[in-house]
Amino acid sequence: MEHGRLARPAQQAVKKGNELAKPKTKKPDWQMPGILSEPVEDYLYSMLPPRDEVLAEMEAEAAKRKIPIVGPAVARILHQLALMINAKTVFEMGSAIGYSTIWWARAVGQGGLVFYTDGDRKNADQARGYFERAGVLSRINITTGDALELLSEHKQEFDIIFNDVDKEDYPRVFRLAVPRLRKGGLFVTDNVLWSGKVAQKNPDKTTSAILEFNRLLYDSPDLFTTILPIRDGVAVAVKR
């Protein structure tokens, strides 16, 4: 693997007429195409600077094992949001191998603290190794268990709460998270467009939970919400 870059998948030329046409490179599952038109999405990803060795390795591992991560386009938004409000405390609900956790930890800087949560001890152990290699372990509190229960144990107010748990739990997360967010803090949620299923008729149970959650966000007098239509949809709500 080239330092700071993802290894390029092997490509094989495909004959098209009398010319050799470049085959399409298979996109990683974490990219979740479909919300934006493919040319626009390809352009956005082509603009992204190379990630460092640790993040690139995590992206490759997530693609190989089909581990859900937000990917670099959304991760840059998360990092930027934290910088914009000078966030020092982030509670992350559903952290997997810690990809987005590293982006948060780098944004909060020295003295900041990110709470990693995941229900899988193996994920947490693997994440710890990545955190150490990335030089951010001292900024991360690693806990395993149910993210909603772990959040409910905290009485402090956070600068940012990031929601990426099981989608059917989203309405419950709303009721837990908003009271634990400081005024001016951000409630950020991934997968709120759910591969476009939110616009389809006869939604299933999971999509219905996301629809209920999105309505709660926009109807809340305590929040000002915008959904960013990138990747699988990211909701950003600021507490008034």
Image: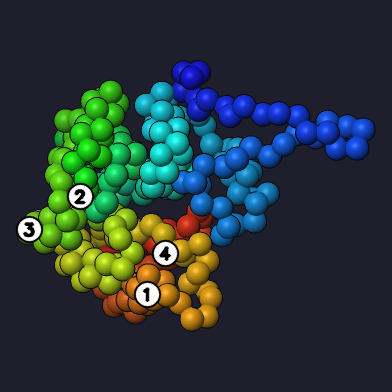
237 versus 64 height, above or below: below
Measured Cα–Cα span from mark 1 to mark 3:
28 Å
Which one is closest to the eye, mark 2 or mark 4? Answer: 2
Considering only order in the chain, which callout, 4 or 2, is on the residue closer to the N terminus?
Answer: 2
Measured Cα–Cα span from mark 3 to mark 4:
26 Å
Label 1 is placed on what type of residue? Lys
Q: Which residue is mark 1?
A: 205
Considering only order in the chain, which callout, 2 or 1, is on the residue closer to the N terminus?
Answer: 2
Quarter occupied by residue 217 = bottom left
Q: Which residue is mark 4?
A: 192
Label 4 is placed on what type of residue? Val
- Mark 4 surroundings within 10 Å by alpha-carbon count, few (fewer than 14), some (14 through 19), many (20 or more): many
56 versus 96 height, above or below: above
**SS state under label 1:** helix
Q: Which residue is mark 3?
A: 153
Residue furthest top as drawn? 2
Which one is closest to the eye, mark 1 or mark 4? Answer: 1
**SS state under label 4:** loop
Residue displayed at 12% across by 60% down:
149
**SS state under label 3:** loop
